[in-house]
Image (cartoon, rainbow, N blue to C red):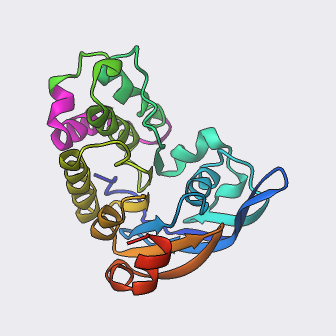
Amino acid sequence: MPGEDEKAETLTVEDLSVHYGGVCAVRSIGFSVAPGQSVGIIGANGAGKTSTLKALMGLVPRSGGRIRFGGTDLTKVKARDVVRHGIGYVPEGRHVFPGLSVEKNLMLGAYARSWRDGGTGEALAEVYDLFPVLKEMRSRLAGALSGGQQQMLAVGRALMSRPRLILLDEPSMGLSPKLVEDILAVLVRLREEGLSLLLVEQNAKLTFEATSDCVVMENGEVAMTGTSRELREDVQVRRIYLGL
């Protein structure tokens, strides 16, 4: 689904820190997401995972560090303009517009396309191909959808800008096991189509299956990195960081 005519770009995070008042939520972390790579960020509650994603999008103040996406220094880009540089974002809690129809919610995700290259109709068709239920319910108010359908809508809305990299924060939260499997299938398909993914998830099974590599965070710092297969079998990761 990413724009094939666009130059592939790497996300590079160096010494990123986030403070809320006197509390350090993220402390000098670094990692990268290469073109087409799928990376998970795992760790216990309060490890700094969501703060990391919000900092990448410019939604919380950064107290240090540098973020680059290809040739762009994102630390100098306003939050409202990050999507224009090819990064999509699916926030925790979905945050759809309940009083608007499904299709209008999706079209709002395409606001940046006029800045780049158009093609909104094609992007909409691709989202409907990925989520047929949204096409069936395109005239229904988003607030009338189930939790799983709203999550699909949130992902679809982020895809409407044709990102080269998509950040997802807890996409399986509150969903039934069947819907979690559906979300996993979508993430695997997007990965296979070459879209770069950065996934924050409490569901370790989903994370390990949807990604090729993982970053383990603890108390705002990077504690471990490795392939998803290696970390899935690591006794320390399973016992200390995931409680398995």
Quick one: 216 or 97, which is closer to the camera? 216
Q: Is residue 210 left or right of residue 115?
A: left
Q: Dividing the picture into quarters, in which one does residue 164 lie? A: bottom left
Q: Residue 215's spot in the image, x, y percent?
A: 49, 73
Q: Please name the residue shown 43% across and 74% down the image.
A: 214
Along the line of sight, the residue nearer the viewer: 1 or 118: 1
Q: How far across and how far down the image is residue 160, in percent?
A: 36, 39
| Number of numbered discs visible in the structure rendering | 0
Tell me which secondary structure the magenta stretch mostly adopts. helix
Residue 132 lies in the magenta-colored region: yes
Q: Is residue 210 left or right of residue 117?
A: left
Residue 207 location in percent, x, y? Answer: 35, 65
Which quadrant does the C terminus fall into?
Answer: bottom left
Residue at 60 percent of width and 42 percent of height: 81
State which region is magenta.
115-135
Outermost right residue:
22
Residue 125 in picture, x, y percent from top left: 21, 36
Q: Is residue 2 above or below residue 239?
A: above
The picture quadrant where one finds residue 2 is bottom left
Q: Is 86 on the left-hand or right-hand side of 69?
A: left
